[in-house]
Amino acid sequence: MNKQEEDILLSLYDEPFINQRILSETTGHSLGVVNKSIKNLLKNEYLDDDIRLTSKARESIKKKAPINAVILAAGFGMRMVPINLETPKALLEINGEALIERTIKQLREVGIKNIYVVVGFLKERFEYLIDEYGVELIVNEEYATKNNLYSLALVSDKISNTYIIPGDVWCDRNPFRKNELYSWYMVSDLVDDESDVRVNRKMELVTVPEKKGGNAMIGISYLVGEQAEIVKQRINAHVRNKRYDGSFWEETLYEKDRMIVSARVVHATDIIEINTYEQLRELDEDSNHLKSDAIAIITNALDVKAIDIIDITVLKKGMTNRSFLFSCRDKKYIMRIPGEGTDQLINRKEEAHVYQTIKDKNICDDIIYINPNNGYKITEFIEGSRVCDPNNVDDLKMCMKKLKEFHALNLSVDHEFDIFKQIDFYEKLWDGTSSVYKDYEKTKKHVFELKKYINEHIDKKCLSHIDAVPDNFLFTKSGDIRLIDWEYAGMQDPHVDIAMFCIYALYNKRQVDRLIDIYFENKCDKETRLKIYCYIAACGLLWSNWCEYKRNLGVEFGEYSLRQYRFAKDYYKFFMEEMIENESR
C-alpha cells in the first residue's frame, strides 16, 4: 500500500463508506486518487465489494497501531529567556494547563498509557507526573552538553509503534490517533525560513536549499515497522560518535535529499511549538509563567510595560552568564542573567563598585541597571559593533592601546583579585573531588613556585580588568573601543590583563610574544616578559580549575579547558628554560 491507500483505509476504519466524494473530503486526496486507491485496495483484498475493511486490512491496522510514546523534555530551552531559569519549557502553562500535561492527556485519550518522559534540566519538577499520570521518567544526565538525539538514545529500545513528541508543543486539537498505518513526521502549512524540509506532491519531505523556506517542522513523529528499526540503528550508532553530541534526533530520518518517513501536514494554528517568551505571550497573555523577575526589572528600569518588551533573542551562551537581547521603544538593550554557580564565583557588590568607579570614563558600555545582590544587569546594545579579531594585528594594536590607556588611569577599588587565592578557592568548590588531571598536584606545585618571582617584579597595582579577552573588546561604528564584562575586575598588576588576553585567544608562544611587543611598543624588558609568562601559567591553572568547577555543574568547555591546563604546564616550562639560560650566561 502507498500512503494514499493507507489514509483511505484508516478513514474507512473510523467511518463507514458513503461515497467517494466524502472520502475525498475526509482524507484530503483528490477524487481521482480516491478512485484509483479503492481499486488497488479491492485488488489486494484490503476491501471487499461493499468497500468495507477485510480481516486482512484490520489485522494490518492492528499490527501497526500505536503502543507507546516518548516525550523529549530534557533540554534547557535557551530561546525561552528570560523564564527558562525557573521553569522547563514542557511545564509552561497555557490557560492554566502545563504543555506536557495536555500532551499526556491527549495520548491517554487515544488509549496510550505507556509514556516515557526524558528529563534533564530541573528534572525534579517532573516527578509529580509519575503519580499523576503513571508516566516513566528517564533522566538524561548530559542534557547540558548533548542534544535530543542523546535523549532519544536512552529510550531507543522502546521505539516501535511509537509517537516521538517534543515537550514544548501545544496542540489545540488532539494530533494522536488510535490507529496508524505508516511512519510520518509532522510539519505545518506555515513557511519557515529555518526549516530543512518541504512537502512535495507525493507527500514526501524533501530537503530545501540553504536560505530557502520550507514547511515549519513541528517535531511530532510516528515510527513503525522498517523506519522504526532504521531510526533505532542510526541513533545507537550516532550516539557513540561525539560529532553528533549537538544533533537533533531528526538527523536519523534523512536519506540523501529526503526523509525516510512521509509528511503529515497540519494547520499552523492547530499545533504550536513554544520556543520564545513572546510566543507564549501571544498564546496566553495571562500565563503565570510570564511573570518573570527579569521582565519586572526591565519594566521598572526603563519605566515601560511588559508588552513594550519585544524581539527577545537569546545571545550566544557565555562562559559565565546567559544574556538576551531585546527591543523597547525603538532602542535595543542587553540583559545579563548570571549563569549556574556564579553566586559562588563572583562578588556582585564588588562588580557594582567597579562599574561606579569607571562610570563616565568612556571605557565600558552604557550601564542602565545593575543589581549588586543578584548580578542582573541591563546595558544599551551597541548597534553595529564587533569584537576584536585576535589574529588581526591592527585590531590588536588598537585594543592594547585602549588597555594601556585604562591602566594609565591608575584607578583604585577596595578589593583585589588574588590569582593564587582564587586557584585555591576554585579548587575548594570541587567539593572534595580530585582533579581530572593525573599530574594536577605536580602542576600546581610548579605554578605556585612562580609566585616569588612575580612578587619581586610587580611595579604597581591598579584596577585591572582581569577578563580582558578578545570577545570583551567592542569596536563601535564610530571607531571607539569599549571594554565590557567587568565581573572579575579588581586591584592587580595590570600586566595580568595581557596574559588573560593570550590564554583566552589560545595563542602560541610566538603570538604571545607579539602581543607583549605590541603593548610595550617593542620596549618590554626581559624580566617583565618572564613575569607575564608566569602570569600565563598561573592564569591557565586558574581557569582550568574554574572549568573543572563548571564541569561539575554540567557545563563543558571542551578544548578551552584542556588548553588552559596546557598553558599552566608549558609556560612554567618556558619560564624555567629562560631562567636556566640566563644563569648559564
Image (cartoon, helix red, strand yellow):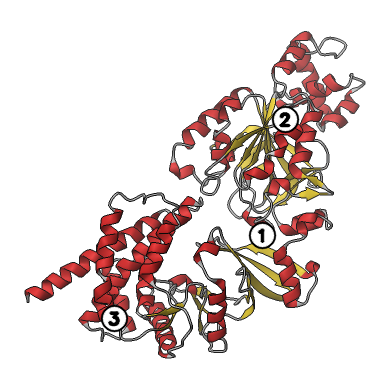
Foreground pick, 2 / 383: 383
Q: Quadrant of residue 23?
A: top right
Q: Which amino acid, by three-letter code, is at mark 1?
A: Val
Mark 1 lies on a secondary structure that is: loop
Give the number of the mark in front: 1 or 2: 2
Q: Is residue 369 above or below residue 243?
A: below
Q: Which amino acid, by three-letter code, is at mark 2?
A: Gly
Task: Give the Cα distance between marks 1 and 2.
Answer: 31 Å
Image quadrant where one finds the N terminus = top right
Q: Is residue 442 left or right of residue 426?
A: left
Give the number of the mark in front: 3 or 1: 1
**Residue at the extreme left:** 585
Q: Which residue is mark 2?
A: 134
Q: Residue at x 25, y 74 (%)?
A: 452
Mark 2 lies on a secondary structure that is: loop
Numbered tag placed on residue 307 in the rendering: none
- Which of the two labelled residues, at mark 1 and mark 2, occupies the earlier sequence position? 1
Label 3 packing within 10 angstroms: few (<14), some (14-19), many (20+): some
Q: Which residue is mark 3?
A: 517
Q: Quadrant of residue 129?
A: top right
Give the number of the mark in front: 2 or 3: 2
Q: Which residue is mark 1?
A: 81
Q: Is residue 158 above or below residue 293?
A: above
Q: Residue at x 44, y 39 (%)?
A: 241
- Which of the two labelled residues, at mark 2 and mark 3, occupies the earlier sequence position? 2
Image quadrant where one finds the C terminus = bottom left
